[in-house]
Amino acid sequence: MGKYKNTSGGPVQVSFLDLRTVEADEVVELPDFQAAHNPESKPGDPDYLAIAWPENRWEPVTEPVTGAKASKKAAE
């Protein structure tokens, strides 16, 4: 699962979320792979079933480094 922000400018219905409506600028967790994906497969394999979310509607959200991760990174 990955976090994505709705950047479409309006609400979007998402079938993976049981047709839930995701409002503009809302951040939600969306699957990175289809249910039949083989985790041991590689790009190009027939059972590598990654989901490509349209860039004109969704933007990946990276979580800021906080807590123990931030302390560890600052010490390096």
Image (spheres, rainbow, N blue to C red):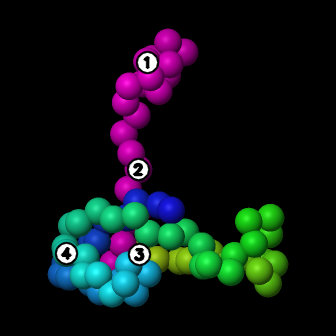
Closer to the chain start, of discs 2 and 1, is: 2
Q: Looking at the picture, how far across and down is residue 64, in whole percent?
A: 36, 39
Task: Residue at 29% x, 81% y: name it.
Answer: 20
Tags 2 and 1 in contact by the CB under 8 Å rule?
no
C-alpha separation, residue under disc 3 versus residue under disc 4: 16 Å
Closer to the chain start, of discs 3 and 4, is: 4
For disc 3, the neighbor class at 10 Å (few under 14, some 14 to 19, many from 20) is few
Q: Is residue 64 magenta?
A: yes
C-alpha separation, residue under disc 1 versus residue under disc 4: 34 Å
- Please name the residue that numbered disc 3 is placed on: 55
| Quarter-of-image position of residue 29 | bottom left
Q: Which residues are magenta?
A: 56-76
Q: Which of pointers 2 and 3 indicates the residue nearer the eye?
A: 2
C-alpha separation, residue under disc 2 versus residue under disc 3: 15 Å
Q: Is residue 51 left or right of residue 14?
A: right
Q: Looking at the picture, how far across and down is residue 17, in whole percent?
A: 38, 78
- Please name the residue that numbered disc 2 is placed on: 62
Q: Looking at the picture, how far across and down is residue 31, in whole percent?
A: 50, 70
Mark 1 residue type: Ser
Q: Which mark is residue 23?
A: 4
Closer to the chain start, of discs 2 and 3, is: 3
